[in-house]
Amino acid sequence: MSIILVGGMDRLGEQYLKEAKKQGMNLRIFSRAEQNMGSKIRHADAVVIFTNKVSHQARNEAVSAAKKQGIPVFMHHACGVCTLRECLNCVSLIQQQPASVICSQSGKEA
């Protein structure tokens, strides 16, 4: 499963990657807006955005690209490894049971 992370702290990049690998997911990190970011997002299974550590431009571009492709977007204000872990768990649950599972911001089933 391919996940895009937009935002977050540069110093936590390696830990983000380790956490995704532990869950069997491929993570690509955009810590800031990049040229053609929308075209790089289009093949992802989900997009995670850490809103407190990213520009409005990058956030808007990621959301727009994801919506065009029908990719689920998860936005969180916090940007720690635990937040990513919860978000990845939620993505995993949704992929397994798309119609019956709804995840809250805490990453727990609702």
Image (cartoon, rainbow, N blue to C red):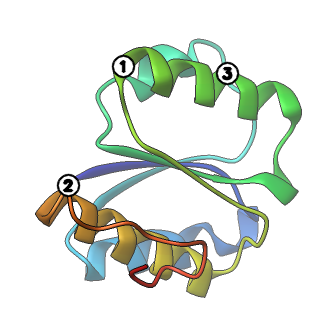
Element marked by disc 2: loop
Q: Which mark is residue 69?
A: 1
Quadrant housing residue 8: bottom right
Q: Is residue 109 left or right of residue 65?
A: left
Residue 79 position in % (x across, y down) = 72, 71
- Residue drawn at x 57%, y 12% as measured from the top left: 36
| Residue with the mark numbered 2 | 99
Q: Earlier in the sequence, mark 2 or mark 3?
A: 3
Query: What residue is pinned by disc 3?
Result: 61
Numbered disc in front, either 2 or 1: 2
First of labels 2, 1 by sequence position: 1
Q: Mark 1 and mark 2 in contact (Cβ < 8 Å)?
A: no
Residue 46, given in percent of the width and then of the height, sits at 38, 46
Q: Residue at x 29, y 28 (%)?
A: 43
**Is disc 1 surrounded by few (<14), some (14 to 19) or many (20+) residues within 10 Å?**
some
Q: Residue at x 86, y 32 (%)?
A: 56
Q: Residue furthest left?
A: 96
Helix, strand or loop under label 1? helix
Which residue type does callout 3 highlight?
Answer: Glu
Separation (CA) of disc 2 from disc 1: 19 Å
Answer above or below: position of 15 versus 92.
Answer: below
